[in-house]
Image: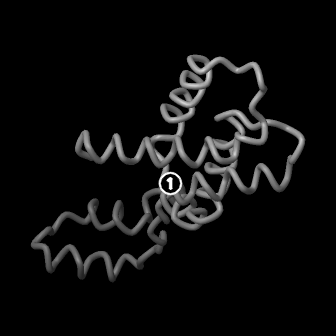
Amino acid sequence: MQPSEIAHHRAQILASVEVVLHGYWQPDDAQGLRAAVLADWCDELEPWPVESIRAALRKHRKDHPNRRPNPGHILAILTEAWGRRNADQVKAALAPAPEPPKERISAEAAAAIMAEMGVRNPLSVKTISGIEAAE
């Protein structure tokens, strides 16, 4: 993002957080402290889309109306929601690649393959067909 886009994004985050936290502000919060708290929120939540942040803030407020959230609470909600939406992709990315089937071929089939390749070594035929391992 361009610096102006980042600034706009952070302003949207700040507005969303401030609306939700308004009900939790303490009357003695100094303006400097309040600005620092909101800057911390912006730093933590900046990578997330504003719509997702709003949804997470609302979810926290609905689930925990008497507990003031901190950025960690909202990040946990965002991460969990992201995981649910992308579970299939994550599983696919982490799944080991399937192994090719281990088929045993007959000595005759191995000899035919070797002949096509121009190899005439009977020992190679035994090795490829797995006869050597079974003997």
Q: Residues within 10 Å of mark 1 (few under 14, many from 20)?
A: many
Q: Is residue 16 left or right of residue 122?
A: right
So how many labels did they put on this image? 1
Q: Is residue 56 left or right of residue 9?
A: right
Residue 95 sits in quarter: bottom right
Q: Is residue 31 above or below residue 69?
A: above
Q: Is residue 111 above or below residue 97?
A: below
Q: Nearer the viewer, residue 20 or 59?
A: 20
Looking at the rendered structure, the secondary structure element under dot 1 is: helix
Q: Is residue 102 left or right of residue 87?
A: left
- Residue located at (77% from left, 49% from top): 60
- The amino acid beneath tag 1 is Val
Q: Nearer the viewer, residue 117 or 17?
A: 17
Indicate the colouring scheme.
one colour
Query: Could you say where residue 82 lies in the image, as x and y percent from the top left?
Result: 59, 57
Query: Could you say where residue 114 lies in the image, as x and y percent from the top left?
Result: 20, 73
Residue 124 sits in quarter: bottom left
Q: Is residue 53 above or below residue 76?
A: below
The residue at which mark 1 appears reads as: 50
Query: Could you say where residue 54 lies in the image, as x and y percent from the top left?
Result: 61, 55
- Residue located at (62% from left, 49% from top): 79
Outermost right residue: 66
- Residue located at (75% from left, 56% from top): 59
In the rendered image, is residue 49 in sight?
Answer: yes
Query: Could you say where residue 7 lies in the image, as x and y percent from the top left?
Result: 34, 40
- Residue located at (48% from left, 54% from top): 49
In the rendered image, is residue 135 in sight?
Answer: no
Q: Nearer the viewer, residue 117 or 111?
A: 117
